[in-house]
Amino acid sequence: MRHPANVAVRLVDYRPADFLIDAVALDISLDRTATKVVATLSLRRNPKGVSGAPLSLDGDDLTLIGVKLDGRALDPREYAAAPDRLLLETVPDAPFTLEIETRVNPTANTQLSGLYRSGSAYCTQCEAEGFRRITYFLDRPDVLSVYTTRIEADKAEAPILLSNGNPGETGDLPDGRHYAVWRDPFPKPSYLFALVGGDLGVVRDDFTTMSGREIALAIFVEHGKEARAAYAMDALKRSMRWDEEKFGREYDLDVFNIVAVSDFNMGAMENKGLNIFNDKYVLASPETATDADYAGIEGVIAHEYFHNWTGNRITCRDWFQLCLKEGLTVFRDQEFSADMRSRSVERISDVRGLRLAQFPEDGGPLAHPVRPEIYHEINNFYTATVYEKGAEIVRMLRTLIGEETFRRGMDLYFERFDGAAATVEDFLACFAEVSGRDLSHFALWYSQAGTPVLSMAGAYDANAKSFALTLRQETLPTPGQSEKKPVVIPIAFALFGENGEKLDLASPDARPDELVRGLIELTDAERKITFTNVPSRPVVSALRGFSAPVRLEPAPASADLERLLACDDDPFNRWQAAQSLALRAIFARVDAAKNGAPLPPAPGFVGALRGILASADSDPAFAAQALSLPSEIDLAREAGRDVDPDVLFAARIGLRDEIGRALGADAEAVYARLADAGPYTPDAASAGRRALKAVALDLVAAGDPAKGSALAQSQFAAAGNMSDRLGALGLLAFLGGDAREAAFDDFYERFKGDALVLDKWFSLQATIPEPETTERVVKLMSHPDFSLANPNRVRALVGAFSNANLTRFHALDGSGYDLLTRIVLELDRKNPQLAARLLSALRSWRTLEPRRRALVEERLRHIVDQEGLSPDTKDIATRALS
Ligand code: TRP
Ligand code: ZN
């Protein structure tokens, strides 16, 4: 594979394009190995560009057949064509048309960027720079064009032909071929172009918009899977309604199409009027999808739909502004899910996700600002920082200016930038204007990388009945940013008295609105606030609802956490209290093990859990979250340095077993009450009961493995839905023995041929925390159902092994690292985007203890030294070593 030149792109170098392309007419004749593409571009010089500049069009791996300018075929001496560029030194100053013919081979396209084949269908993926793999173009998001697309194909092979916009003429052609025309009236950048051709099943529905327009909805799936698209269709209609109700945003085309494909590098793509999805985020049935899968479908369907306004109608000026569409759209999909489900449960799982993926990124060598200032490979910047931290910034903005003002700011943003390619500054200016607030300090969240650490010190004066609180913030250096400034941290805040009562806030040091709203703004490195009329030593509940993406260190004293767990009316902080207590109990075991001291029991924590279990029926989903111990990944992150996964694993299991021995009987009663839930429905309340049931079963097994195994075996055999079946299989996989192998065999026989379910089968085996697992993963790579060509399968096996099986991946003999290195290098030749993503499992290597650190460093150096490495993988390996 040829690779494009690996040059740095910098935000400060942004210049408007020298040309604009007002209209694009594409004529694409699909063929498995030689697809003919004729692109007719209506070009004119950009008044904001360099006058007299040559026309330089982007390409990637293209074969040029011919070029015509205003209808005249150009002599090859009139242009310079390379696979990655088409250069015309002299073009007219007046508007002109350029007709470019290229050939592409979709079958040979294993990168899954540009035009490729998934199964028997043709499909495209153009974000970020895939359109240039179809035709030469100004492939940048600030060039907006109106597209007309004519697709031609063999009618038997591809009876369905789709592109962006509204459907136009269709008809039959000689030789069994046919065509369809699509017109998209909304100017869009090339990354939003899409095309699909194939023999697909379809589910149809309709939606009446708030102004009474009828929209034809369709979801295209593999034949026979139509019934599994029902939930996605329902989620789509709810998303459409929600965007009208919450943001006043109406859909704008006559049709909205979704296509599910099985080979896809990411979750889904928001192409105008033609979203293309990884089928994992479309297909669900009770027998094949877990509650988490259903929630994932609802969230991703909403996310892509919401992009129609935040991303498509208003797009990004350049790729540095990626968070403008992604952070904002994640915020919107999180709010949608919160409205559809339980707001607090949604918030807890969103924050868990942020800490799982974004905090380690922000704390390691791959740290970058939410709006980066330099990149070598843009595909490596579709990160948790851009998406999830980007969403947190929007959330903080809303917290600071209030919901109602936030909505007015969004309205202004939509009004002012509709049809334009905008920047983060454009976005913030709208909110500054409606709120009358200077947001220049707040804007630092976009440009400064690293997770701020917030600390609190309180002193109670019993005589003065006052409570002095000192808040401090600090952000550690990150690559390329050694000096950090204080940021604006909104701290949602409450004080609780001795009897768990919430205290009225009074202080001469705070603004009245801060006291009324319970929202303290920390803008300097330090702020001291003395609260008055405090009757007794209070407990502080800070960062309620996780009001800012910071780390609170150290966590409050254990006695305070136990009080918060009992009395806080903020569910997030109640959950946080349980997590903090668990972390403390586990790290106490880690320390004891290190010093050869007896392992300290955690009676206070266990008692608190007993209380949660006793009242679990009132909110099962919350109870399930509060009863779940921090994962090994959480522990590794919180340890922060000299990480030894074996020690963390042992400490965690030790605490789990202690809890199981103490609460096994209580848990068994909860389990028994929840055992028969009746027929499956995917709603949040039912999912919450199933989640609690799974946690209860795990506690039973922790206290009495034989009993846990017996219950898991019968749950596995009798399960009426995938959540229950997979939950039981997960426990059996952990417990081991003959029951495990029998269950895996049974599961395989039951679901072979069902790719999405087999992914689960591969994943669970990869996460067994036993020495034999590495060998098992190697064997599974030669399983007839394994293929490096399918990203879902690769992520299921290799991604799960390297991200979720800490003890095996970090095995001291280096076998886990060797396995990943081998796969990354092999995959790099086929699908660099995926290879680079897999490699980022090593991003936190500097926090490992020295022996493992040395092992990883050696592998990373080996990777960087490879010849012909893709820019994607080279970029990750180079930055990881920096
Ligand atoms: N814009 C897509 C989303 O967030 C992300 C995406 C889909 C993507 N496919 C991609 C990004 C390929 C880079 C490369 O919904
Ligand atoms: Zn997105």
Image (cartoon, rainbow, N blue to C red):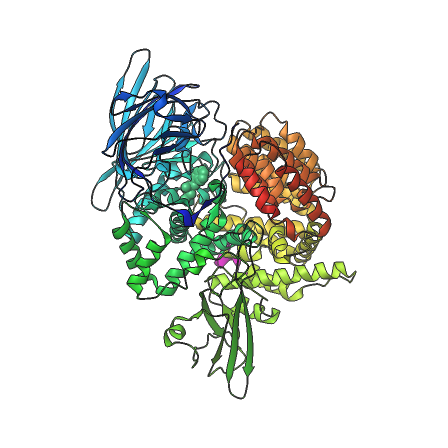
Let me know if residue 615 is in the magenta part: yes
Spot occupied by residue 242 in the image (x, y as percentages of width and height): 32, 49
In the image shown, does 558 or 781 lie closer to the viewer? 781
Spot occupied by residue 462 in the image (x, y as percentages of width and height): 55, 85
Kindly tell me whether residue 101 is visible in this rendering.
no
In the image shown, does 423 or 651 lie closer to the viewer? 423
* Residue closest to the far bottom: 463
* Residue closest to the far left: 212
Q: Residue at x 63, y 64 (%)?
A: 605
In the image shown, does 500 or 390 lie closer to the viewer? 390
What secondary structure prevails in the magenta region?
A: helix
In the image shown, does 470 or 239 lie closer to the viewer? 470
Ligand 2 sits in quadrant: top left
Kindly tell me whether residue 423 is visible in this rendering.
yes
Let me know if residue 14 is in the magenta part: no
In the image, 820: left or right of 54? Answer: right
* Residue closest to the far right: 596
Q: Residue at x 36, y 16 (%)?
A: 156
- Kindly indicate the quadrant of the structure image that contains residue 251: top left
Q: Residue at x 64, y 63 (%)?
A: 584
From this view, report whether residue 805 is shown above or below residue 655: above
- Kindly indicate the quadrant of the structure image that contains residue 37: top left
Q: Which residues make up the magenta segment? A: 614-621
From this view, report whether residue 758 is shown above or below residue 104: below
